[in-house]
Amino acid sequence: MTGSARGRGEPTTTERRILRAAVRLFAEQGFDATTVQQIVDAAEVTKGALYHYFDAKDDLLYEIYHSLIGVQAAELDRIVARGLGPRETVRAILVNLVETTAARVDETAVFVREMHKLDAERMAAFRADRRRYHETFRAVVAEAQRGGEFRDAVPANTVVLIALGVINQLPTWYRPDGPTTPNQLGQQIADFVLAALET
Amino acid sequence: MTGSARGRGEPTTTERRILRAAVRLFAEQGFDATTVQQIVDAAEVTKGALYHYFDAKDDLLYEIYHSLIGVQAAELDRIVARGLGPRETVRAILVNLVETTAARVDETAVFVREMHKLDAERMAAFRADRRRYHETFRAVVAEAQRGGEFRDAVPANTVVLIALGVINQLPTWYRPDGPTTPNQLGQQIADFVLAALET
DNA sequence: GCTACGATACCGACTGGTCGGTATGCTCAT
DNA sequence: ATGAGCATACCGACCAGTCGGTATCGTAGC
């Protein structure tokens, strides 16, 4: 119990380099197909260093996910707290989500593909975070539907599943060097979702 | 070069049992985490039988994908050939896609997660099929936008990416024993997409 | 100011076990 | 008798994790 990866303090340079290499390799080859040796070679450290900071290969996966969901949940709370109207809130959520996801395509790709490999305890933690996010988003939509600002033909729950589904699939087709900026793409997706919801 | 999995004739019972067991295990545990021994145990055959029909573990993955995309592409062509109006065509595509995906959640889950493990040749074949599907769908939307039946605020390409993104994410949240039938869910998704597109 | 000492950060050869794949042989149906 | 359809024993490569060390640094006692 020494490394900051186990909960204390800021990550060191070595630790960050290991995680960066791990994310890239996991995204390219998958978790199981990536060997610890490949990770340490790419990070230009040694196996000893890796196992100094992390107890197991699985820990890398958890750290990757943890830093991702943390940022996104915080952003969501921040946006909702602004107390804008439902249209602007939904737009802000979607644009922000597309932007943060585009900035972390590798992390998102890895997590979408490999999340089921978490052990029971971490899976529970993941589900809790996921559920909280989902619920917050759903509440915004449901509230606007009750108030008559959004049409309620499609259940709020399904709306959220559709919206988050699009985001999670983003890593499979979004290209950073493509013609559309993350912000533009976010606006397009927001346009689409709002067009479907507006009365 | 003996088995029907290599392109000749109908799959035998043994072959089907192997594939069914493989799909289930791949969906549960992932491709790499599933051992060949687990597959043959689950299928109640032996390793000799498996390697009699398949050259390598990777072949199982390809067979799974191949049977899935084959069915869906055929359905798409069938629907488009009917020559309905754009609204009804899009609705039919989406409802059908949800239904076939719901009927094969395991196959879809496996493929979404593991497609990047195909070798170059098979990856090329996959991309070609995928592109053909995407293009056919996109043409329907683009044509209706040009004709003024759909609004063109969001590019047809993005519309298709959104729609297919939702479908591909379906295995992560769709539950066969849930309250919503595949057809209902398909209608909801079609409602949503059409609401966003209609002028 | 020096040194003993504990702690942290790291090194890299090694191992025990696992897993994809193969070699070989048996047994029916044709 | 010949080949398809299996069964079983086995091989060799590979890989996560270990473990006995070393290097460097802060600090407390003298």
Image (cartoon, coloured by chain):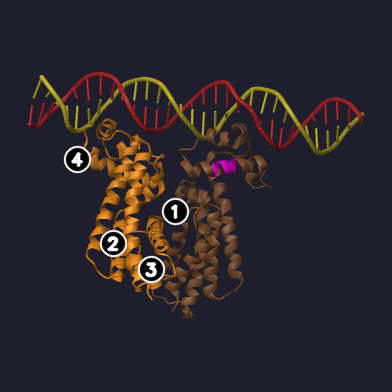
Chain colours: A brown, B orange, C red, D yellow
Q: Which mark is residue A123?
A: none
Label 3 SS: helix
Query: Are dots 2 and 4 in contact, CB under 8 Å?
Result: no
Q: Secondary structure at mark 4?
A: loop
SS assignment at label 1: helix
Q: Label 1 sits on what residue type?
A: Trp
- Does the magenta stretch mainly form a helix, a strand or a loop? helix
Tell me the amino acid under the disc marked 4: Thr
- The local crowd at label 4, few if under 14, some if 14 to 19, many if 20 or more residues have their Cα within 10 Å, is few
State whether discs 4 and 1 lie on one chain: no
Q: At 36% across and 67% down in the image, what residue appears?
A: B189
- Residue B187 in the figure: left or right of residue A97: left
Residue C3 picture quarter: top right
- On the image, the x and y values in percent for residue C7 come to 73, 36
- Label 1 belongs to which residue? A173
Which residue was labeled with disc 4?
B12
The disc placed on residue B96 is 2
Q: Which residue is tagged 3?
A: B193
